[in-house]
Amino acid sequence: MNNSKQIKHLYARAGFGIRFEDLHDRENWSIKKSVKKLFEASEKTEPINAVTENIDLRPRNYNTMTDDEKRALNQERNQQEKALNDAWVKQLSNTEAQLREKMTLFWHNHFSCNVGNSYYQQELNNIERANALGNFKTMLLQVSQTPAMLQFLNNQQNQKNHPNENFARELMELFTLGRGHYTEQDIKESARSFTGWAYNGKDGTYKFNNYTHDTGTKTFLGQTANFCGEDILNIITANKQTATYICTKLYRYFVNEVPDDTHVAQMADVFYKANYEITPLLKFLFLSDWFYDDKNIGNLVKSPVEFLVGLNRQFYISYQNPDVLMQFQRALGQVLFRPPNVAGWPGGRSWIDSSSLMYRMKIPSTILNAGVIDFVGKATPEDEAYLAAQRKQQLNVIKRVQATADWDKFLKDIPKKTTHQEIAQFMLEPSLNKTVIDEVNQPGDIKSIVIQIVSTPEYQLC
């Protein structure tokens, strides 16, 4: 049985796409075998180790610095930020553990955090990676005790007599229950429970400060006791609404922007009964018939990172200048480790507007063909001035972008006698429409046709 359509969909969602050669090798696999192999490839955790030293960014130190010392600190901080971004993009683009990295990307946005310390950001990212397919409750506790999150949501300032409610509020609104499933009083009582949660400013290790912890009785979600932070997390996860909230987000991430209440409820049942183990939940999702329904194929907009990483993986692209990839991320609205706020990137259709779509459609030709899209079948001016201008443009783009695609490797993967239309059907997730079919059926070499395909609006969907 040829399952190529379903397997292609599985890898578009659970990873960052599949190459011709790999799909050809797996097209007769069952869905069950494909899912099993996907998880096996992601069993190992490869932490990122781009930043090896913690820069002390405490304001009191900064204020006593000279201008030269401040410049040196900012320069080192920027270098660390670039190194961390580059390291993760490379891992996303090259790893065999696609599902683990795809889930790390999900948790990176779920536990949205933006602090100016790349060492702390890296630690948080590695915790999300290590737990990406593990237990949500374990990850929730570990994430909550990272210096990155304690700093970002001000729990370092959360002390008895002066409680800070930021972490307590976002914990429930964005990380677990979702808005409308708790009261303002629950936030206040929860904040009191998290007093004393802090980190050591010198080495970033978590510490519990007895002196600043409120030991009084608290009432939270209908329960009363002398709660500490761990108790609050246990009460929250004991509430099945947390499973429903997480599964709704995962449904939007993997299946469809419009949640199906029945399917989400099925997912929540599996998740809750498995004590928040993530792997059984994802296996249930990827083995469900409805995951492969036509209405759920080619209907999600790729995030900028998914778009760029998908290109990197498909065309074996290497960048001599990692700054270029960060510039692409900025232009498209998603810089890793720099979410816009505590709610993260809204995603979905919000990734696309008229200007970002035009930019997205231009990027493949910029990377793959030095900025030129050879629109086959259309008249090309042959005068010397035009050709000279084209050559100059190409040289400028090559110099600026410094990206190299391995076309030989890409073309070698395509079986001989593959038609242009078959190539388009492989490279695009949505079913081909008449406009795409007419364009790709024009005469032209495969390279030009492929650049046209990845420069279409349809290529933005997965």
Image (cartoon, helix red, strand yellow):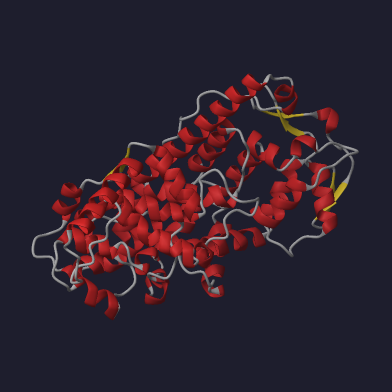
Residue 227 appearing in the image:
no
Indicate the quadrant where residue 289 lies: bottom left
In the picture, which quadrant includes the N terminus?
bottom left
Measuring from the top left, give residue 376's x and y in whole percent.
19, 68
Front residue of 190/88: it is 88
The residue positioned 74% from the left and 44% from the top of the image is 231
User: Is 336 above or below relative to 59?
Assistant: below
Q: Residue furthest left?
A: 417
| Apparent side of residue 18 relative to residue 184 in the rendered image (left or right) | left
The residue positioned 42% from the left and 36% from the top of the image is 87
The residue positioned 35% from the left and 53% from the top of the image is 310
User: Is 409 above or below relative to 246?
Assistant: above
Front residue of 372/331: it is 372
Indicate the quadrant where residue 363 lies: bottom left
In the picture, which quadrant includes the C terminus?
bottom left
| Apparent side of residue 256 relative to residue 6 in the rendered image (left or right) | right
Measuring from the top left, give residue 250's x and y in whole percent.
52, 60
